[in-house]
Amino acid sequence: MALTKIGSIGINTGIAFAGVTTIATLNGSDNVLSVGGTVNFVSDVSIGGTVSIAGTLTYEDVTNVDAVGLITARDGIIVGSGITLSVDGDGFFTGIITATFAGDGSALTGVANTDVIFPDKISLGDGTSTDGDQINIGVGSDLKIYHNGSGTGSFIDNNTGDLRIRSDDVQIRGSNDEIIALFYENSSVDLYFNGNKKIETTNTGVTVTGTVAATSYTGDGSSLTGIEVGIQTAVPKSVSGITTVLDLSKDDFKITAAGITTVDVRGGSEGNSHTIRIVNSGVTTVGFSTYFLFPSGGLPNIPTTSGTISLISFTVHRQGAVGIATQLLAGASVSFA
């Protein structure tokens, strides 16, 4: 059915269109259909031009809206009580959003759930300490993890504070699973060479398996065992008219003597050799305890003149014990003016 030139001077109580109706020409200078009341359409309505609604357009029981072209909402869109799309581009959602995102997400705020689960893996390209593909942690990228791709390897760059690894035990292994180092909480730190443990820390110090090479040591070494040390010189105070006792834990002794002096010893180990240098301060007479055994059973010829120097060497033949006297095999005295 087609209607042309519809006009009305008075009040119409209603025009009902049953079926498909085409309005080709309206009666008026502006071709505008103006309806002051309610228009009811009991079937489909097809409008080829623009529909302008000054008030509110209410849809009831609409299950599907199919818009082929662009929809423009000047004051935003509200869907129920959970979704609001504002005119400036913001979206507000109070429920669960299921979506696929693109971009780095650097502008996201207010994200309550900090757990991100990747079912497979994270793949990054090659980076450097300053740029490229990296895992950056901290507001100022304080911690960076990356592989540089140049063959020198992978890096963990920590730029703030200490890098702490917290674990009961920590293992460092090579690419073939060979142990390099082991760190145990409340226990030892073990260092390996070619799969063999070389250094182990203990509660009293460190245990080394193999040879220790060092340019120098500090301390007196008095607690060291099982090693050979260099010559150690003991210099007793100037003695006069008394017995001077030498501690044979030393190798060399220098005695400045005056008057009558007797030399005695304590300790010593069988086979160890020692030397005594005697400097006369004034007229001096030097004697030796019965521990000293001289060639042919005689006594050494020690000069008495002031300023002379005598040198005597001896080897411990037997270390004394209860009922057994120490025996020192001494050489003849050598005098130096």
Image: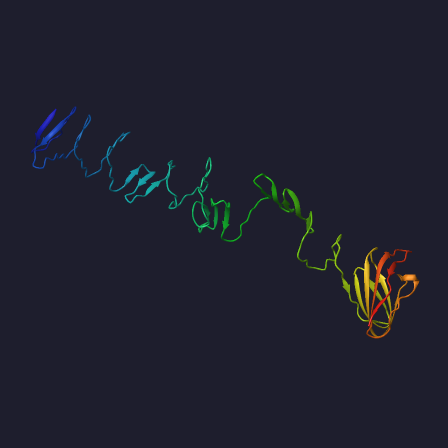
Q: Is residue 156 above or below residue 247?
A: above
Please state if 88 lies on the left or on the right of 142 as rendered.
Answer: left
Rendered residue at 82%/59% (across/down): 273
Q: Position of residue 54 (x, y in %)?
A: 19, 39
Q: Residue at x 27, y 41 (%)?
A: 76
Residue 114 left/right relative to 33: right
Q: Name the outermost residue toward the right.
A: 297
Residue at image position (33%, 38%) is 83
Q: Nearer the viewer, residue 14 or 294?
A: 294
Quadrant location of residue 5? top left
Q: Residue 161: x percent and y percent?
A: 52, 53
Left or right, residue 196 beside residue 84: right
- Disc tally is 0
| Vertical placement of residue 253 versus 181, above or below | below
Q: Is residue 89 above or below residue 63?
A: below
Q: Nearer the viewer, residue 54 or 298?
A: 298
Pinpoint residue 119: horizontal percent, then vertical percent: 46, 35
In this rendered view, identify the residue nearer to me: 278 or 16: 278
From the viewer's perspective, tell me whether residue 1 is left or right of residue 161: left
